[in-house]
Amino acid sequence: MRPEIHLEEVPAPSRIAPYALALTAEVNAAPRTMDPDAFLGHGRFVVLHDPAGQEAWHGTFRVIVMAKARLEEEMGADPMLGEVGWSWLTDALTEAGAGYHDLSGTVTRVLSETFGGLELRGGQVEIEVRASWTPTTTDLGPHLKAWAALTCTTAGLEPLPENVTALTRRR
């Protein structure tokens, strides 16, 4: 896991499947910190498990993810943003070796314009990638790795080259 990403377990949904796990991630420009001034983006990773299987999943596990971050206005206006955001997900799954089927989801861009006393803040553009899929095996490590990569990419971090580990400065 990259040092810019901080994971935390949170309450998981309890009505959809008998077993569930949920994690949130915060991506910061400053490694290994939760500095609000260095905040780049965040995400959520949920694993659902129903030993009896669920027809809509075509399996016994379902992974549900979300990654969200602010964008530069120019990037937010790009008509290809949806396809690019979706490719961040599919590329992350492929690069992590996370086998899947029944992938579905959305890429949403939000343009917020401020008025009145909030005009000093100016407008802001955000991207949100939401997806779910059924893993092809019970090894969920590659799926977690793919989601972490998606969350970091959405937050604007450059991908690390293959077989390279991010190092942090010693204090």
Image (cartoon, helix red, strand yellow):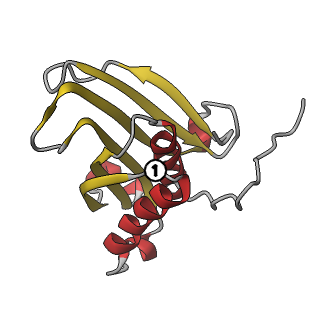
Instruction: Say whether residue 112 is visible.
Output: no
- State the quadrant of the N terminus: top right
Q: Quadrant of residue 51?
A: top left
Left or right: residue 30 versus residue 20 is right
Left or right: residue 145 versus residue 10 is right
Q: In the picture shown, does residue 169 fall above or below 156? A: above
What residue sits 56% from the left and 35% below the top? 36
- Residue 52: percent from left, percent from top: 15, 26
**Badge 1 element:** loop
Left or right: residue 102 versus residue 159 is left
Q: Quadrant of residue 170?
A: top right
Left or right: residue 153 versus residue 114 is right
What residue sits 26% from the left and 27% below the top? 49
Mark 1 crowd level (few <14, some 14–19, many ≥20, 10 Å Cα): many
Residue beneath disc 1: 98
- Residue 33: percent from left, percent from top: 66, 31
Q: Camera-side residue: 114 or 156?
A: 156
- The residue at the far right in this view is 171
- The residue at the far bottom in this view is 79
- State the quadrant of the C terminus: top right
Q: Quadrant of residue 37?
A: top right
Q: Camera-side residue: 78 or 152?
A: 152
- The residue at the far left in this view is 55
Q: In the picture shown, does residue 127 fall above or below 53? A: below
- Residue 19: percent from left, percent from top: 26, 19
- Residue 112: percent from left, percent from top: 29, 58
Instruction: Say whether residue 11 is visible.
Output: yes
What residue sits 70% from the left and 60% below the top? 162
Q: How many marks?
A: 1
Q: In the picture shown, does residue 74 fall above or below 50? A: below
Tag 1: amino acid: Ala
